[in-house]
Image (tube, rainbow, N blue to C red):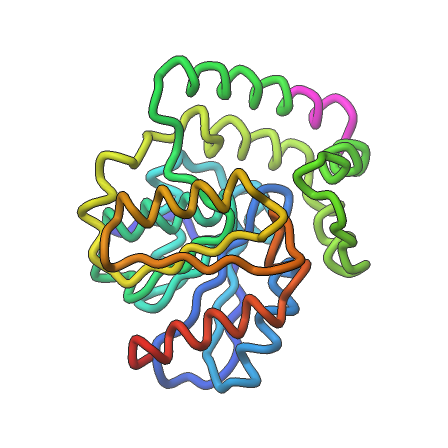
Amino acid sequence: MQHPAVLHRIVEGPQSGGPVVLVHGFTQTVRSWDGVAERLLRHGRRVVRVDLPGHGGSAGVRLGFAEAAAAVGQAGGPGAYVGYSLGGRLCLRLALDRPEVVAALVLIGASPGLGEPSEREARRRADEALAREVEAEGTEAFLDRWLDQPLFAGLRPAPAELAARRANPPEGLASALRLLGTGVQEALWDRLDGLAVPTLLVAGAEDPKFASLAARLAEAVGPSARVAIVPAAGHATHLQRAGAVAGLIDDFLREQGR
């Protein structure tokens, strides 16, 4: 069943052929894929970029995790899905729930969720604290602190991308933390062996936590999954090494005959 909510999207490239659907992370927008999208378009790809609930053109949309994943599939349609962090978690849920929509899957710095209830509850409390912070101090101050985390060391956002992130309303980001955070997400580890679509798991070489997680994910999924580690990149690999990430996506899809 399609969800009635409509997420903002940008569609570019030829109208024929299945699209590559790009799904951003928390605090980001469709502009965060500018570098990757530009290169995929040069390869003749049709590209669909989707704004997640609480972000960008979808800032007023409020959906729970499963509903948001379904809405991403509604916005993108049948095709290959590329998700970063929060976007990757949603794309993974979509691929498990509706494999007929996801022909191929690329997850960048993404997690299937927290397996232990105590971990989820601790994360839910942490996300609630962050939601209150962004509501109290506004997006710009919150984003400055968010990007100052060690996770994003070495990242220098492009001016247009950073401006788009600063334009996200604080109430939208707060709702995303409360409705789409890892603390409220149903853990997907037990479903991974049912993921039949070809899957590429991408992480930056300077992001050891998610590089290790990518290896664990590949083992849990089985032969349909493989790992690619991007040199000289941290967690936000698609922002630091857009050309390398676009090349990985294009090569992976060509291997699948797409």
Residue 243: image quadrant is bottom right
Residue at horizontal 18 percent and vertical 47 percent from the top: 194
Q: Which of these two is toward me, 257 or 129?
A: 257
184 lies left or right of 187: right
Q: Which percent across, then down, holds residue 221?
A: 26, 48
Residues shaded magenta: 132-138
117 lies left or right of 140: left
Q: Which percent across, then down, holds residue 253?
A: 37, 74
Residue 3, visible in the rendered structure: no
Q: Which percent across, then down, holds residue 187?
A: 33, 31
Say if 182 sits above or below 30 in the image.
above
Say if 3 sits above or below 11 in the image.
above
- Residue 84: say if magenta: no
Q: Which of these two is toward me, 196 or 89?
A: 196
Residue 82: image quadrant is bottom left
Residue at horizontal 51 percent and vertical 47 percent from the top: 109
Q: How many marks?
A: 0
Q: Quadrant of the C terminus?
A: bottom left
Say if 92 sits above or below 77 in the image.
above
Residue at horizontal 53 percent and vertical 34 percent from the top: 176
54 lies left or right of 79: right
